[in-house]
Amino acid sequence: MAENICTNLRTCPLVNKPLLPEEPERREVYLQTYCFPANNKYLECRRYIFKLKYGFCPDFLMPDSVMCEDEVLDRYEEM
Ligand code: SF4
């Protein structure tokens, strides 16, 4: 059902920018694990969670990243 699909699908850079992620072999894994299945897995995606809280998500943050929010924000501010 449509409501089980990530609401960021049309705009998320991971889906729409072919050069992401930094490890290109992980791209299809991310898409098939978090983005496209209608199984609510996107609710566990770090990109989804971060954007929900902060209103944006840096390109470098990947769905299964173990970086804490402070590390993400620090790295983003250094860019
Ligand atoms: S990477 Fe995460 S936020 Fe982006 S479309 Fe996939 S599930 Fe949604």
Image: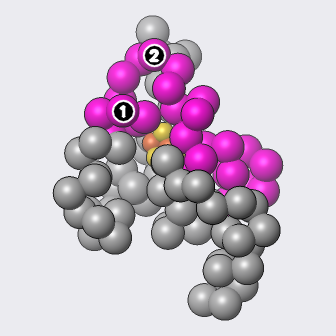
Residue under the point 66% across and 79% down: 76
Secondary structure type for disc 1:
helix
What span is in magenta?
Answer: 31-56
Instruction: Verify whether residue 40 appears in magenta.
Output: yes
Furthest-top residue in view? 1
Location of the C terminus by quadrant is bottom right
Instruction: Verify whether residue 47 appears in magenta.
Output: yes
Give the prevailing secondary structure in the magenta stretch.
Answer: helix
Q: How many marks?
A: 2
Residue 27 located left or right of residue 13: left
Within-10-Å neighbours for mark 2: few <14, some 14–19, many 20+:
some
Within-10-Å neighbours for mark 1: few <14, some 14–19, many 20+:
some
Q: Position of residue 58 (x, y in %)?
A: 58, 67
Q: Give residue 39's mark.
A: 2
- The answer to whether residue 5 is above or below residue 56 is above
Q: Looking at numbered disc 1 in the image, what kind of residue is underneath it?
A: Thr
